[in-house]
Image (tube, rainbow, N blue to C red):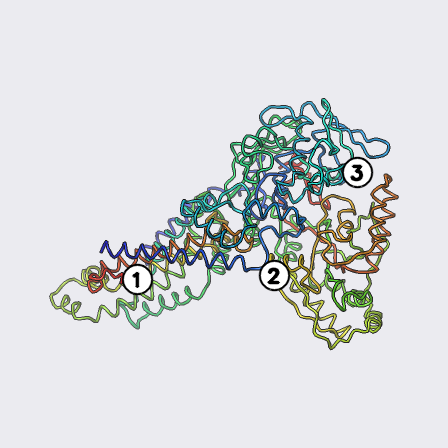
């Protein structure tokens, strides 16, 4: 198992390398540079700026220098924010983004698994149709719509929740969490329902029932363990998606997370920041997928031999 | 499900407000201003930054030789309590206010300004606003590396005086000094944290920052807030009624709008266009609309056929119904342009006109000999719904009145800038906001080969007139020459002005003494909160 995890960790290196090189080439191929501004700077100034940020060197040397420094943890200075490093800027927003993602995923699991469970136990009945219809709605409404609607209702009409910020005012984490988590709650609900329906029809559940175990015990101890597997497998990509998609929620609720840097950097042609955030999100995606594979392998004996990692 | 519901209701009830007082109400009582400030500032080094959000912050933290007078658009004493101007208008002597101090208690000395100006003019710093000081003798040569000795630049310190020698009499020199690029930095601090020409200087960090403005820097959390509080050492502190300011970087105008409506900020620096009408009806006292010193125009690439033909350009301009654009699309009280420089009723008011005359346009198009069946011209703009609506309207007008085929291309901001600078466009939308209240900030842009000209247009008479105007001390004489230049510009139309910008924003009625001025600048020490 440990060997397999190490093997997977080893694959990070080529993946990250490819990400850096492809991103590097793409951002340099995009028209416009970090120092283009409405008020045009003289060629002499642009030259000085390029020199200051090592952009006057050939691209392969720039990539080499970047990788050389990045290995030592130095992701370079931000072009957009002179005097600040990319690492510093990312670290200023990362804890908030991770916190937002964790709350959202917990909210999504809690709401999604419970409604999926309820639906799977009442197939075809009203308790199945209603949660599943709502979940379909949840998948369909993008956070860019849901966020402002929630703000309008709870922030402006009823004035019960703050409309912006993170950790500044009591209750200001609720709306962003719901906004970001809803779509995933809906997916989890459908995955749970599907997984549970499949499991509930299997022999070992029938055996458990025949043995006279209580229904709750059957569901919680026996069925849920297998029924929740699709949710667990999806957890990795979901967290990665949450992190990368936090940009929208961070913008709507004015949250100082790292997601905003990710998108703004591309618009600003802030080369080092684009690279830094790309590396970060690649790393996190790989890691969360790995973690969810490990968890799934513990829950599913058929995957355990290979560690679910092959 | 039920458990969740109960938990949710509990959370809501926990977070409910104790009373009905909004954040704005509470902070107003504490004398603290909450300002929606657009994007996160890229920094607070006055010699490096270039944007409006940065300007709004620097206005609190630093002070130049003079202060912008928000009532008259003129100047008030700042670090310099008085100044003398030689008869030929070339030498300015600024006498320093002995009470002007840095936040560490040191007196602000003329030498600090000499250091600061040397810093911004040093080519190694790569300052993008260094050309603001080109009016100072030899400043341009020093900045371009043609002279290495800063002593040759026309700025020197004598005891408590700063003597500035100019290249030409520049009656708007004092106005230039209200721009942050001319403001001082504390030399020892700059040296200590990276040196004069380091762009990576750490002197602007919260614990390092030494300023001389009415407020001092308290905290700065990226993408969250930048807080300043009253500077007790500031020479004008007694008349300052504001205890502190929170600058909130909110780049999404809808978020800012929601925050304003929920009582979270005193000022939302933009209003979503579609909501202007509603605000006019429902909250007229909070919606501020006034003229802004900016022009929205179409830039023409005069190097390309058929745009190199003046008759063709005139035909384009004559077939644009500006009234319709302003009234039906913009709906924000913008004024139709009749000159490139936004007119100022009291001072500069050029006698030019940009009429809508499709019949005349057709004739001129015919004269130009252009065949409308040629491959279509392209209008380039940076992606924005507002620019798109205007471009579509103009596309329609040109099609209807001239039979001209035009394609619209929208690209992201940096691509747009790159294409404009490299001349890879036919017609592109553009906007310019004046840096100081003088027509020169607009007209100078169109001088041959100026970086911001970007049209390829060159007219030696125009260049000569502006050159000539620079040596005139009398404002009246200067403005007469500017009008002449303006006429040439409007006659040749390398740029097609469309409308004068309006600043539209939301301001809480608790903010008093706010002045609506064309530069949209209100030094905070003149405001009060109720």
Q: Position of residue B53 (x, y in %)?
A: 61, 45
Q: Position of residue B103 (x, y in %)?
A: 59, 28
The one of A28 and B211 positioned closer to us in this rendering: A28
Please tell me in which quadrant of the rendered image residue B1 appears.
Answer: bottom left
In the picture, measured across the screen, residue B208 lies left or right of residue B155, that is left
Front tag of 3 and 1: 3
Q: Are marks 2 and 3 on the same chain?
A: yes
Q: Which is nearer the N-term, disc 2 or disc 3?
A: 3
The one of B497 and B526 positioned closer to us in this rendering: B497
**Which structural element holds mark 1?**
helix
Subunit bearing disc 3? B
Front tag of 2 and 3: 3
**Residue B60 higher or lower than B323, as above or below:** above
**Which structural element holds mark 2?**
loop
Residue that mark 1 sits on: A233
Q: Residues within 10 Å of mark 3 (few under 14, many from 20)?
A: some
Q: Residues within 10 Å of mark 2 (few under 14, many from 20)?
A: some
């Amino acid at each position: 198992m440990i060997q397999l995890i190490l093997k997977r960790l080893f694959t990070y290196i080529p993946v990250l390398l490819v990400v850096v090189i492809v991103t590097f080439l793409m951002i340099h191929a995009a028209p416009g540079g970090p120092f283009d501004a409405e008020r045009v700077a003289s060629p002499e100034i642009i030259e000085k700026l390029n020199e200051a940020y090592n952009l006057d060197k050939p691209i392969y040397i720039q990539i080499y220098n970047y990788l050389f420094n990045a290995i030592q943890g130095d992701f370079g200075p931000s072009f957009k924010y002179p005097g600040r490093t990319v690492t510093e800027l990312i670290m200023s927003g990362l804890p908030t983004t991770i916190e937002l993602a964790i709350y959202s995923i917990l909210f999504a699991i809690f709401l999604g698994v419970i409604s999926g469970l309820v639906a799977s136990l009442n197939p075809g009945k009203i308790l199945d149709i209603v949660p599943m219809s709502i979940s379909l709605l949840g998948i369909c409404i993008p956070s860019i719509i849901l966020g402002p609607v929630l703000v309008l209702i709870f922030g402006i009409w009823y004035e019960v929740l703050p409309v912006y910020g993170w950790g500044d005012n009591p209750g200001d984490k609720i709306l962003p969490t719901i906004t970001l988590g809803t779509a995933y709650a809906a997916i989890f609900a459908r995955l749970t329902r599907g997984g549970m329906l499949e499991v509930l029809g299997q022999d070992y559940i029938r055996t458990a029932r025949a043995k006279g175990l209580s229904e709750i015990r059957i569901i919680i101890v026996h069925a849920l363990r297998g029924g929740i597997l699709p949710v667990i497998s999806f957890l990795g990509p979901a967290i990665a998606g949450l992190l990368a998609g936090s940009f929208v929620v961070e913008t709507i609720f004015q949250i100082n997370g790292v997601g905003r840097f990710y998108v703004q950097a591309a618009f600003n042609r802030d080369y080092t920041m684009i690279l830094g955030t790309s590396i970060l999100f690649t790393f996190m995606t790989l890691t969360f997928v790995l973690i969810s594979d490990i968890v799934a392998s513990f829950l599913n004996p058929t995957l355990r031999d290979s560690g679910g990692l092959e | 499900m039920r458990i969740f519901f109960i938990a949710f209701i509990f959370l809501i009830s926990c977070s409910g407000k104790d009373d009905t007082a909004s954040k704005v109400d509470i902070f107003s009582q504490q004398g603290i201003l909450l300002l929606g400030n657009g994007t996160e500032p890229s920094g607070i080094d006055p010699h490096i930054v270039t944007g409006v959000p940065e300007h709004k912050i620097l206005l609190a933290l630093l002070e130049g030789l003079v202060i912008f007078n928000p009532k008259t658009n003129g100047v008030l004493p700042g670090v310099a309590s008085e100044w003398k101007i030689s008869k030929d208008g070339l030498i300015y002597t600024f006498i320093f206010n002995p009470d002007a101090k840095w936040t560490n208690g040191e007196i602000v000395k003329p030498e600090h300004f000499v250091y600061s100006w040397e810093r911004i003019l040093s080519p190694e710093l790569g300052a993008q606003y260094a050309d603001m000081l080109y009016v100072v003798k030899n400043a341009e040569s020093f900045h371009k590396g043609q002279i290495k000795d800063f002593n040759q630049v026309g700025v020197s310190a004598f005891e408590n005086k700063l003597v500035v020698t100019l290249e030409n009499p520049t009656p708007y020199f004092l106005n230039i000094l209200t721009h942050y690029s001319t403001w001082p930095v504390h030399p020892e601090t700059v040296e200590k944290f990276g040196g004069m020409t380091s762009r990576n200087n750490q002197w602007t960090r919260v614990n390092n920052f030494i300023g001389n403005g009415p407020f001092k820097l308290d905290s700065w959390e990226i993408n969250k807030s930048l807080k300043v509080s009253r500077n007790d050492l500031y020479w004008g502190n007694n008349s300052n009624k504001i205890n502190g300011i929170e600058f909130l970087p909110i780049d999404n105008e809808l978020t800012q709008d929601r925050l304003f409506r929920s009582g979270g900020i005193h000022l939302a620096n933009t209003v979503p266009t579609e909501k202007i009408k509603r605000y006019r009806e429902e909250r007229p006292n909070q919606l501020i609309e006034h003229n802004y010193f900016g022009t929205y125009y179409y830039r023409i690439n005069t190097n390309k056929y058929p745009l190199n033909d003046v008759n063709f350009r005139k035909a384009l301009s004559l077939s644009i119904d500006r009234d319709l654009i302003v009234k039906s699309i913009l709906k924000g009280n913008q004024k139709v342009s009749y000159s490139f420089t936004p007119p100022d009723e009291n001072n500069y008011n050029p006698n030019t006109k940009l009429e809508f005359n499709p019949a005349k346009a057709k004739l001129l198009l015919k004269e130009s000999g252009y065949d409308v069946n040629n491959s279509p011209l392209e209008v380039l703009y940076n992606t924005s719904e507002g620019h798109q609506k205007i471009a579509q309207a103009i596309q329609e007008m040109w099609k209807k009145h001239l039979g001209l085929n035009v394609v619209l291309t929208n690209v992201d901001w940096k691509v747009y800038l790159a294409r404009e600078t490299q001349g890879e466009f036919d017609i592109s939308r553009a906007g310019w906001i004046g840096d100081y209240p003088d027509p020169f900030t607009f007209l100078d842009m169109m001088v041959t080969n100026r970086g911001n000209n970007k049209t390829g247009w060159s007219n030696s008479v125009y260049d000569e007139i502006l050159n000539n105007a620079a040596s005139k001390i009398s404002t009246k004489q200067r403005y007469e020459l500017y009008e002449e230049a303006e006429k040439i510009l409007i006659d040749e139309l390398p740029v097609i002005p469309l409308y004068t910008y309006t600043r539209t924003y939301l301001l809480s009625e608790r903010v008093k003494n706010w002045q609506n001025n064309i530069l949209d600048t209100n030094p905070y020490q003149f405001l009060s909160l109720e």
